[in-house]
């Protein structure tokens, strides 16, 4: 969830509520989180996407082109790929920005 408000200094800030979102299936775990509580309009911030899954699962490439609504994707990087026994852990860093005033949520 993201909230946007105008500070007394005249700067507009984006408040990102940092709450890890997670899901778990029998063979897959997923989490998402952001790295900052506030950003100014146009500043970038990081969204991290982590998956841990059984090596026997076929994972498709990360595809977020229009999936993030009003957020602009600046960059996507795979920052970690680790195999631990029969489990694979992947973490992606998605660099985002937003240029709109108001209340926003990362879909």
Image: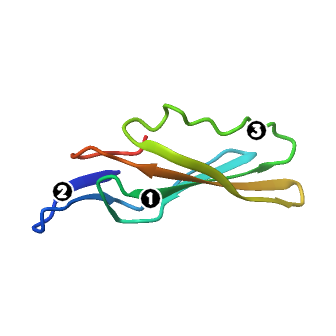
Q: Where is residue 72 in the image (x, y as percent from the top left)?
A: 43, 42
The mark nearer the N terminus, 3 or 2, is 2
Task: Tell me, for residue 5, which label it has, or none.
Answer: 2
Q: In this view, does 93 lie to the left or right of 68?
A: right
- Please tell me which residue is depicted at 40% across the width and 35% down the height of the picture: 69
Task: Tell me, for residue 45, which label it has, or none.
Answer: 1
The number of callouts visible is 3
Task: Tell me, for residue 35, which label it has, or none.
Answer: none
- Please tell me which residue is depicted at 23% across the width and 53% down the height of the picture: 4
Q: Position of residue 12 (x, y in %)?
A: 20, 58
Q: Check disc 2: other Cα within 10 Å, few if <14, some if 14-19, many if 20+.
A: some
The mark nearer the N terminus, 1 or 3, is 1
Q: Nearer the viewer, residue 97 or 102?
A: 97
Mark 1 residue element: strand
> Where's the C terminus, which quadrant?
top left
Q: Check disc 1: other Cα within 10 Å, few if <14, some if 14-19, many if 20+.
A: many
The mark nearer the N terminus, 2 or 1, is 2
Q: Where is residue 88 in the image (x, y as percent from the top left)?
A: 80, 54
Mark 3 residue element: loop
Q: Do the residues labelled 2 and 1 touch (CB within 8 Å)?
A: no
CA gap, disc 2 and disc 1: 17 Å
Task: Tell me, for residue 59, which label it has, or none.
Answer: 3
């Amino acid at each position: 969830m993201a909230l946007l408000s105008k500070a007394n200094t005249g700067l507009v800030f984006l408040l990102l509520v940092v709450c890890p979102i997670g899901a778990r299936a029998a063979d897959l775990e997923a989490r998402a989180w952001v790295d900052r509580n506030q950003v100014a309009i146009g500043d970038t911030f990081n969204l991290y996407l982590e998956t841990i899954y059984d090596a026997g699962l076929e994972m498709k490439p990360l595809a977020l082109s229009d999936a993030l609504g009003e957020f602009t994707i600046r960059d996507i990087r795979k920052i970690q790929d680790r195999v631990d026994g029969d489990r694979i852990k992947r973490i992606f860093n998605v660099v985002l920005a937003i240029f709109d005033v108001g209340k926003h949520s990362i879909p």
